[in-house]
Image (tube, grey):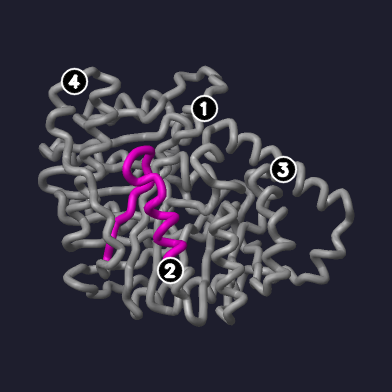
Amino acid sequence: MSSTLAVAGHQLTLLRNGEEYFPHLLAAIAAAQHSIHLETYIFAADQEGRWVAEALQQAARRGVRVHVLLDGFGSAALPDGWVERMRSAGVTVLWFRQELGRFNFRRHRLRRLHRKLVVVDGRLGFVGGINIISDISPGMHAPRLDFAVEVSGPVVHDMHAAARRLWALVSWSQLRRRGDRDALPRQLKSDTRQKVAFLLRDNLRHRRDIERAYLKAIGQAQYEIVLANAYFLPGRKFRQALVSAAARGVRVVLLLQGRVDHPLQHYACRALYGQLLQAGIEINEYHASLLHAKVAVVDGQWATVGSSNIDPFSLLLAREGNLVVRDAEFAGALRASLLAALEAGAQRIHVDHWQGLPLWSRLLTWVSYGVVRLLAGWSGYIRAGEEI
């Protein structure tokens, strides 16, 4: 059961999986009086998508200004009829880099809207990794493991400004409404010294904010790091930070994807296991269902929940959003949930088992790693100063 915590003038509710997330989201939409901004990577034409679409339409019909921003790749399967029904009800829908059914092998196609952000009336926000899609993936019997946070308080002003700014930029670029550009909300000033902070990853001022927050927390860790990430392919600096933490006696626990959903990323990630295991880092693969979480807890005091994977595409290409919370009670709740998931549904990878894998299996991981490195370099990631 989710519970609400008070942290430095904020009310925070940690939500695990869609089972907890969607009732809170639908209640917030139903209570909206003035405006709704919803950004998502995937908006699926399933039962959960229908619930959200109908709630948004009802809000628009009663006079709420409803803005929906969809990624053109992640939500490409959403039927045109769904979009038209939302628009007919008064919902304004825009697409972030819509490909219009054409395959363009261009670098900009990797720059996606990956953040999952909702702001209602500028006073209530949701941020995390949960898309507008059913909890149960095809072929699975258990819900995917994921998290989001419902938050009210001063940080929602930053979330609202970020949503309004991206909306204005996309609107101006697609509809050529030059007047909107003059009214752009202020740029956020990331300040991770706050108890609750909203961090962006974009292609301008905030290219490395989320990565830097991770590196700072890892660098200051004294006894424990618990990190769960669906697509874990960190660059050299991030890997070295984890290895250095383990070397000074910090327990480093990774909960990673065990089931293969994106083969290239899955096997590329495994190419790093040898180095991490040799450093004493604990690697656990989640098999109970699909892992989609992008969260971490450091020393039971610092926590982050968001949309950013620890891979080159999230850290330096996609638009992402993470909430950082410095509070023992919130961090403790997230840690407990992660350890429960690890205990119930993960398998630990041991050094001797890893070293005993057949040659073909190791070759597959290194070929996958090489392909991802090639794509990262082609996209401009390596030129940005990072090695993977």
Relative image position of residue 34 (x, y in whole percent)? 11, 44
What's the amino acid at mark 2? Ala
- Between disc 2 and disc 4, the foreground one is 2
Residue at x 57% of width, y 54% of height: 234
Disc 4 packing (10 Å; few <14; some 14–19; many ≥20): some
Residue at x 20% of width, y 73% of height: 8
Front residue of 206/224: it is 206
Q: Is residue 103 above or below residue 12?
A: above
Q: Is residue 199 magenta?
A: yes
Instruction: Identify the residue under disc 1.
Output: 107
Closer to the N terminus: mark 2 or mark 1? 1
Q: Which residues are the magenta region?
A: 196-216
Screen quadrant of the N terminus: bottom left
Say the numbered circle drawn on residue 368: 3
Closer to the N terminus: mark 3 or mark 4? 4
Front residue of 22/377: it is 377
Front residue of 357/150: it is 357
What's the amino acid at mark 4? Arg
